[in-house]
Image (spheres, rainbow, N blue to C red):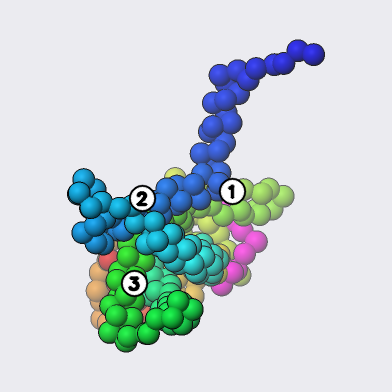
């Protein structure tokens, strides 16, 4: 029976598949976790300093750190999945990231205190509140760094996806068209029909209402200016403050249509619009 050795291309394809898989991301996190635990435990006590005469590998501290980091990783993983599904898949912004970090650290606090009290009881120790508090604060600080290292790339990828690569599928008559966000100028409603205007001025009818589109599209890029139009941030050419606290907007593309020739934003929406645009 003849054995076929894998070719260079086969190995290369398999390696690329592994690197792009979730297994590779978990492998990266495991490497970060191991290095982090080694560094922290080697700096924790004088006997653990490498090169010293009394050097001893901190096996107990290292194993404890690994267990603690695994628990922290599980908490962070499930909390990230929740935030990804509910928030990050639609919009990635600083406030949401801060809430993700704060809630994760809160869950870690709830886990840390009883686990340490139980561990002290098992080994026959006595829980001292001061040391428990110091340990908790250090754990939260290190957890903040670890979670930042673990999920920075994931959050950045979600941000890029929501801004650059996102697209919307539109049914226009018998056709089904996919449009990327960056090629859309605005959506507007006229005679109960919603139209999409592209950057080149092409107008396409859609099967959506503006309310449905508002739920679907990314609100980092799009803003519901009024009940008749949703505009893209990059399409705004000129903003003018007018009477009664209103704002008048002109778009970059010159389209001969009264519905979008001049767009007015009420004084009630003016603050939300300026915050979004800036």
Does residue 264 appear in the picture of this structure?
no
* Disc sitting over residue 26 in the figure: none
Q: Residue at x 34, y 56 (%)?
A: 58
Q: Is residue 90 left or right of residue 35?
A: right
| Marks 2,3: beta carbons within 8 A | no
Which residue is label 2 attached to? 35
* Nearer to us in this view, 28 or 168: 28
Which residue is the extreme one toward the bottom? Answer: 129
Element marked by disc 2: helix
Q: Is residue 14 above or below residue 263?
A: above
* Nearer to us in this view, 35 or 123: 123
Question: Gap in Å between the C-alphas at discs 1 and 3?
Answer: 45 Å
Residue range of the region highlighted in magenta in the rendering: 204-212
Element marked by disc 1: strand
Question: Gap in Å between the C-alphas at discs 2 and 1?
Answer: 45 Å
- The percent coordinates of residue 204 (x first, y second) are 57, 53
Q: Residue at x 60, y 18 (%)?
A: 7
- The percent coordinates of residue 72 (x first, y second) are 45, 67
Q: Is residue 211 magenta?
A: yes
Which residue is label 3 attached to? 140
Label 3: few (<14), some (14–19) or many (≥20) C-alpha neighbours in 10 Å: some
**Quadrant of the image containing the C terminus:** bottom left
Q: Residue at x 55, y 59 (%)?
A: 195
Which residue is label 1 attached to? 178
Q: Mark 1 vs mark 3: which is more N-terminal?
A: 3
**Quadrant of the image containing the N terminus:** top right
Camera-nearest label, 1 or 3: 3
Where residue 6 sits, quadrant-wise, is top right
Element marked by disc 3: helix
Q: Is residue 271 left or right of residue 191?
A: left
Q: Is residue 97 left or right of residue 84?
A: left
Question: Gap in Å between the C-alphas at discs 2 and 3?
Answer: 18 Å
């Amino acid at each position: 029976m003849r054995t076929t050795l894998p070719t260079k291309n086969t190995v290369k394809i398999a390696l690329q598949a592994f690197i792009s898989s979730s297994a590779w991301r978990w492998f990266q996190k495991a490497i970060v976790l191991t290095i982090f635990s080694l560094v922290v435990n080697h700096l924790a006590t004088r006997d653990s300093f490498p090169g010293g005469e009394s050097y001893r590998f901190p096996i107990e501290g290292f194993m404890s750190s690994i267990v603690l980091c695994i628990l922290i990783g599980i908490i962070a993983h499930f909390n990230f999945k929740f935030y990804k599904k509910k928030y990050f898949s639609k919009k990635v912004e600083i406030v949401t990231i801060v809430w993700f970090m704060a809630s994760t650290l809160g869950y870690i606090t709830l886990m840390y205190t009883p686990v340490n009290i139980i561990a002290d009881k098992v080994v026959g120790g006595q829980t001292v509140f001061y040391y428990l508090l110091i340990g908790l604060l250090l754990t939260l600080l290190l957890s903040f760094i670890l979670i930042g290292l673990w999920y920075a790339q994931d959050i950045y990828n979600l941000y890029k996806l929501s801004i650059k690569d996102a697209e919307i599928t539109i049914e226009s008559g018998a056709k089904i068209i996919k449009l990327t966000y960056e090629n859309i100028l605005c959506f507007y409603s006229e005679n109960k029909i919603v139209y999409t205007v592209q950057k080149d001025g092409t107008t396409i009818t859609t099967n959506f209402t503006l309310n449905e589109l508002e739920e679907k599209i990314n609100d980092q890029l799009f803003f519901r200016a009024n009940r008749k139009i949703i505009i893209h941030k990059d399409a705004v050419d000129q903003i003018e403050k007018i009477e009664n606290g209103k704002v008048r907007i002109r778009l970059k593309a010159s389209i001969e249509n009264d519905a979008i020739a001049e767009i007015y934003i009420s004084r009630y929406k003016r603050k939300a619009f300026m915050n979004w645009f800036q």
